[in-house]
Image (cartoon, rainbow, N blue to C red):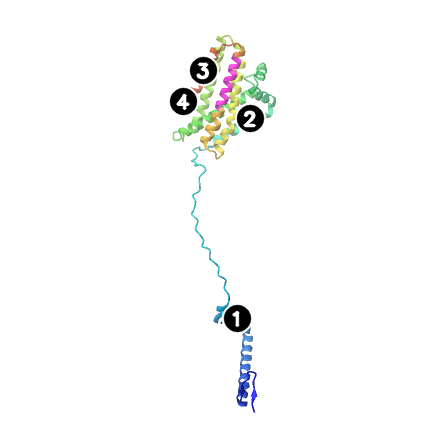
Amino acid sequence: MFVFSSYHEVTEPLTLINSYATKGQDVATNQLQEDNNHEKGISLDTLKQDTISFYGIKNEGAIPIRKVEKEEYKTEKLVPVKKLFNPTPRQIELGGWQTVILIITLILLGFVKAFNSTRFKETLKAIVNYGVAQEITREEKVFFHNVNILLTIIHILLLSLFIYQIQELIYYSQMAHYSFVNYLFIVGFIVAIYIIKYIFSLILFYIFDSTSIFSEYSFNISLYNNLLGVLLMPILCLAYYSFLDINFILYYLALPVLFLTFVLRIIRLYSIGITKGISFFYIFLYICTLEILPLVVLFRIFIHK
């Protein structure tokens, strides 16, 4: 008797019985291993995945692989940063007394604006309008008015501070221990020059019998001096508290302001002389003697020693 298996092979009865017994043992063994794995918390799928990952796949070579070209990262050369400007160390040492002077002048200017607003506005108009200046000089108080006195104090304090600052930039090592004393010396020298100039102008106008012009002349001189003092306030604040180069502030802000106020003052003096019938020769002589000569003296003593 022959039995045909599913593989279409002829198998003897005894061999078939042995094969069924072997299969039964394998099934029992697999069942026992599965139970043991289940008790240990390991599933059959996990073991199967571990077996595949460890031994690999038999047909791994048949899997299509896409080849990707690797991009090589090129190392860029560091480009040096172009400097827009070459910073220079600041040579200004700000002391407490300089800040105090700026605060005092600011308070004085605010006091003038708050309590003498009408006269302050007229003073501003008189800078560009000679007719307004003539109207102010007809009043009883011209040079010794409260507004004029306070603005003159601001002018002297800030002009002295400006001259001191230029002197400090030039002679820094020689002024380290005598800063405030030197500033007071500059203040005293400027006050002395203005007093001498005032007395000499009074004598000169008396000699030429032009004392009526003296009050108008004095007011217009103080007018442009006060304008210079007010304009020096923001310039000094920039020099002390900003990051601008001190040379830029000096050449592009301070010197143009000084030149502008001096030119305006000379033009106003010339207008007064022509209006009052004074000859051009005397006007020129006066400008050289009382306007240019004091500036030369200041420059020679404090700046160009």
Magenta stretch contains residue 271: yes
Q: Measured along the vertical axis of the image, is residue 91 above or below residue 219?
A: below
Assign the C terminus to one quadrant of the image: top left
Q: Distance between the residues labelled 2 and 3?
A: 32 Å
Q: Name the residue under label 1.
A: 49
Residue that badge 3 annotates? 288
* Comparing labels 3 and 1, the label whose residue is closer to the camera: 1
User: Looking at the rendered structure, which numbered label has been put on residue 188?
Assistant: none
The label shown at residue 109 is 2
Residue underneath mark 4: 301
Q: Is mark 3 on a helix, strand or loop?
A: helix
Label 3 with label 1: CB-CB less than 8 Å? no
Quarter occupied by the N terminus:
bottom right
Q: Is mark 2 on a helix, strand or loop?
A: helix
Q: Are marks 1 and 2 in contact (CB under 8 Å)?
A: no
Q: What residue type is labelled 1?
A: Gln
Of the residues shown, which amino acid type is indicated by label 4? Ile
Nearest to the observer: residue 157 or residue 64: 64
